[in-house]
Amino acid sequence: MGEKVVAGTFGLSDRQRHRDKLRQCLTGLERLLEEKRFDRPKNLMGLEIELNLAGPDGMPRMMNGQVLERIASRDFQTELAMFNLEVNIAPHRLGGRVFDRLAEEIRTSLAYAHRKASEVDAGIVMIGILPTLGQDDLVSSNLSAVDRYRLLNDQIVAARGEDFELDIDGVERLMCRSASIAPEAACTSVQLHLQVTPNRFADVWNAAQAVVAPQIAIGANSPFLFGRELWRESRPPLFQQSTDTRPPELQAQGVRPRTWFGERWITSAYDLFEENLRFFPPLLPICDEEDPLGVLDAGGVPRLAELVLHNGTVYRWNRPVYGIVDGVPHLRVENRVLPAGPTVTDVIANAAFYYGLVRALAEEQRPVWTRMSFETAAANFDAACRYGIDARLEWPRRGRYGGTAQVDAANLVRDELLPLAAAGLDAWGIEPADRDLYLGVIEDRCRLRVNGATWQADTFHRALEKGLGRDAALAATTRRYGELMHLGEPVHTWPVGLPEPVPLG
């Protein structure tokens, strides 16, 4: 949702004109694909990280405008709520020591942002859901003062026509209502971009869909919301429910939610954009002046602005992206499933695992998506979100017998997927030192059965055992998390629990 939109009202003619423009854009995309107008392979990847602002007490700080003013860098932008920021890392070519370079860039950026935030008694916390967020923090008055967020909220609320119901049944159960989409802002993620050619897009997207469950199992980092311990990765159910434009009657009819895993393997990027138009009414019917087919007829490259804007309001966990750089169009797969954090090393390890594994699976002779149903992939995603590193997943058997079997997620990653990821990183030309360092972090998480979610939950329960109340235990856990996050050692090495007070004298 990077479009600069201006808040306003939409009439019937606006929506009809916008729908017509969307169809023209889709036809334009189809022609670009047929005419092979897209960029050649460049092995480019990119990274975005959503961040939280919290004070020394561990509580959220609603001041992203003031912090961004001090940071004064285009790399940092607002996100949905006033306690959110986003940092964008410039595209890099996959190869060599790219992961070490990325880690250094991100550490430098976050350290600078944290220093600037501290000038106004705030700090950067890189975590899936800030444990100290309360319902009173996630209200429409705390949305960022940006037109597109207010307008998006107004349109989703109008489409739904009633309060949003949150009902997440995990270790504990959370049931509450919201009059706005503000609870979505609790979800802070890492977004991994991979530029792909059209003929490779379907294989990469299918592979990415197949591996979201292993990604979440090893990377879960969002066990708390509104003081309740829920799923090990609570972002997906929260995101779906807090953006759900469907009242109960439409849910009962099987209308698809806007936060969507999908329902089938694909054969082309076109499939996803076409589904978006077929299933999801536009939320922001803003029309660009461009005539996309006229631009194509004249030999130019259309922006397809309406298609891009609409695509940004359908929240797939692997989203197709159309972009233009230096007058040349390209396609990207945007992997949106991972939570932020816990440390830069953990984020880069998750990225290395993803890029290596997707490369290897996309090039297999018998791809995983030909041996596993899409429904199984969706069920795996649900299980990984609920149980994290302790999840059991349905996965294709190796060998001649075929079929699928239930396997322990940590064992699947360690025994089968990490070797594939290593081979994929070799195919990208990643240096062995980078490959071994970052995949070694994933291996150690699996061996110790530790990720951000397990550390948060275990530390919280230790704090309760020491006699702290729930709110105090969550705040203490958040403060300790922030300390260890900024020290930078990967989460599987973190000591569980709160440090003992140092005796005086």
Image (spheres, rainbow, N blue to C red):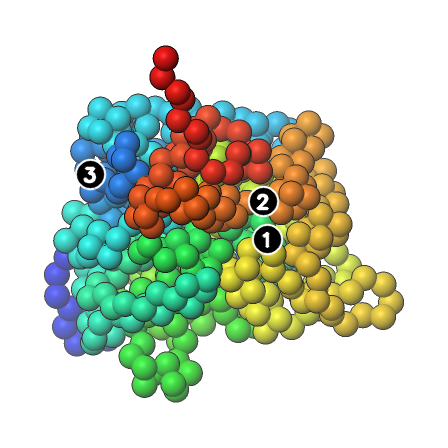
Q: Nearer the viewer, residue 23 or 150?
A: 150
Residue that numbered label 1 is attached to: 389
Which quadrant, please, contains the C terminus?
top left
For the residues marked 3 and 2, what is the alpha-carbon distance in whole angstroms? 33 Å
Q: Residue furthest top?
A: 505
Q: Are the residues tagged 2 and 1 within 8 Å (C-beta)?
A: yes
Q: Position of residue 334 (x, y in %)?
A: 48, 52
From the viewer's perspective, is 428 left or right of 491?
right
Q: Which residue is label 3 attached to?
A: 63
The image shows residue 309, relative to residue 338, as above or below, that is below
Nearest the camera: 262 or 436?
A: 436
Q: Residue at x 55, y 59 (%)?
A: 387
N-terminal label among 2 and 1:
1
In this view, which residue lies farthest toward the front? 505
Does any portion of residue 161 appear in the rendered image? yes
Few, some or many residues within 10 Å of mark 2 (<14, 14–19, 20+)? many
N-term mark: 3 or 1: 3
**What count of labels does the image hold?**
3
As measured in the structure, the alpha-carbon distance from the residue carrying label 2 to the one carrying label 1 is 7 Å
Q: Nearer the viewer, mark 3 or mark 1?
A: 1
> Residue at image x 25%, y 68%?
177
* Label 2 sits on residue: 450
